[in-house]
Image (spheres, helix red, strand yellow):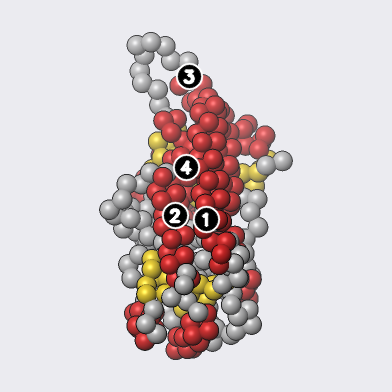
Amino acid sequence: MAKFVIRIAGTLASVPLLLLAVACGSGSQQAADRSDQGDGQQPRTTLKVVTTVLPINLFTQAVAGDCATVIPLLPAGADTHAFQARPQDVATLGKAQVLVINGLGLEAFIEPLLKSADNRDLITIDSSQGITPLKLEDHPSADHGHDHGHSHSHSHGHSEAEGAVDPHIWLDPQLAAQQVKTIRDGLIQADPGCADGYRERAQSYLSQLKQLDDDLANQLAPFRGRTVVSYHEALGYFVRRYDLKAEALVTLPSDQPTPADVQRVSAALKQANVNGVLTEPGGGSSALQALANDLDLSLSVFDPMELVPADQQRIPSLYINVMQSNGAAVTSTLQP
């Protein structure tokens, strides 16, 4: 039986889908109130849904449509790993009916916010439910046995010794589709009056994700087994999906390169027969730029969608567009 996460009295508990439907009676009643309104009556109220990181906001919008008001917690320009909660965020969560998160330890900022908001009726949908995450030590690397040469502490909140996992599941379109399905099912349980709308919009978006995955698979098929070099160790799910390998200057859960990292990646670049390296929006690292210059390599931008864009509208198609650009960036570093 599918499971969701519901927050009761400030704690998280995993409950069966049927139990969630009972526990969310207030949400069901609100949906019934919306559907029972007649002509000339007050405009219907919509479900208030708060989302965390950018991909989750886009996926939730794709499913919600006009059945819910989707509120992004992270403002334009915010970095997922550096986000500092604001007083208004407590108020936002205090008024919300549903919270949608990525999970897997990505949203380190959320627990203190939830405690402060003390919203005992808030339903939390963990979109990573049912997905087996990659452990950091299991990333498809060009050198599985290397020692990164530094201890690990990072905002993901775990050490490798504790079995830290990679939270960037949305970078595999097939896993993104699973997240969309989990969000769909959670919204249906919270708001059954709009069930048909949630299903229809989710199916439409899932079709787009399938096409995206097919296109990327065809585009990257000639490079199977090749190594891409990036700034940030965020490509694990992407390279696994498309049968590539990855080498990163900064390996999770660290956030700054060491001299040993620079030496390791320099050696990998010389062996990988690549034409370029992958940086991120905002420029990535001066060390990576210096390596690219020394080896006469180009820089291409791979956007892991951890930085909320300040100059682009946050609509569901943004995920599709960014992933298409990411595929082109990888191709440009590997093609002859």
Residue corresponding to mark 4: 60
Residue corresponding to mark 2: 324
Q: Amino acid at mark 4?
A: Thr
Measured Cα–Cα span from mark 2 to mark 4:
20 Å
Furthest residue to the left?
311
The crowding category of the residue bearing disc 1, from other C-alpha atoms within 10 Å (few below 14, some 14 to 19, many at least 20), is many
Mark 3 vs mark 2: which is more N-terminal? 3
**Element marked by disc 3:** helix
- Viewer-nearest of discs 4 and 1: 1
- Kindly tell me whether residue 44 is visible in this rendering: yes
> Is 225 drawn above or below residue 79 in the view shown?
below
Residue corresponding to mark 1: 216
Measured Cα–Cα span from mark 4 to mark 1:
23 Å
Label 1 with label 2: CB-CB less than 8 Å:
yes
**Element marked by disc 1:** helix
**Element marked by disc 4:** helix
Q: Amino acid at mark 3?
A: Ser
Mark 4 vs mark 3: which is more N-terminal? 3
Q: Quadrant of the N terminus?
A: top right
Residue 207: x and y, percent?
54, 40
Q: Residue shown at 48%/15% (left/top)?
A: 36
